[in-house]
Image: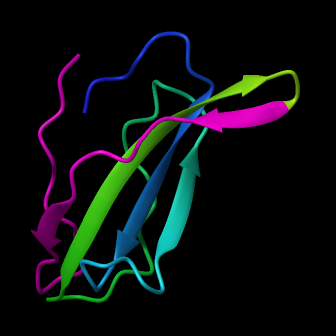
Amino acid sequence: WTPLGGVSGYQLAYSLKPTFKKQSVITIKKKADKVASTASLSKNKVYYLRLRAYKIVDGSKRYSAWTTVIKKKTSKDKEVPAAKTTK
């Protein structure tokens, strides 16, 4: 993903279900941080991921819409396949 200018951070949501029931959310506060810790993911499972930006305005967070859902499978050794990123 390409970091956006003028945002305060991002939220990365992931779930085992495409409906995102029982989703987990990771907050990424710096746009330079393109890698989020996903140590709790199970090996050899399919996960659904989506991302959104937020900006803090007058002390409250304003969120963008979620991105299109992507589907990724973890490998047998618990590493998440890398998504393409651009600089």
Q: Which quadrant would residue 58 be assigned to in this image?
A: top right
Q: Nearer the viewer, residue 22 or 34?
A: 22
The image shows residue 7, relative to residue 82, as above or below, that is above
- On screen, residue 22 versus residue 75, left or right, reads right
Q: Residue furthest right?
A: 59
In reply to whether residue 67 is colored magenta, the answer given is yes
Viewport quadrant of the C terminus: top left
Residue at image point 29% right, 62% down: 49
Q: Which residues are magenta?
A: 60-87
* Place of residue 23 in the rendered image (x, y in percent of width and height, measured from the top left): 46, 77
* Place of residue 13 in the rendered image (x, y in percent of width and height, measured from the top left): 43, 62
Viewport quadrant of the N terminus: top left
Q: Which quadrant would residue 57 be assigned to in this image?
A: top right
The image shows residue 26, relative to residue 39, as above or below, that is above
Query: Majority secondary structure of the magenta segment?
Result: loop
Q: Nearer the viewer, residue 75 or 69?
A: 69
Q: Nearer the viewer, residue 45 or 8?
A: 8
- On screen, residue 10 versus residue 84, left or right, reads right
In reply to whether residue 82 is colored magenta, the answer given is yes
* Place of residue 84 in the rendered image (x, y in percent of width and height, measured from the top left): 11, 39
The image shows residue 82, relative to residue 9, as above or below, that is below
Q: Which quadrant would residue 52 be assigned to in this image?
A: top left
Residue at image point 53% right, 58% down: 26
Residue at image point 15% right, 52% down: 82
Residue at image point 21% right, 67% down: 80
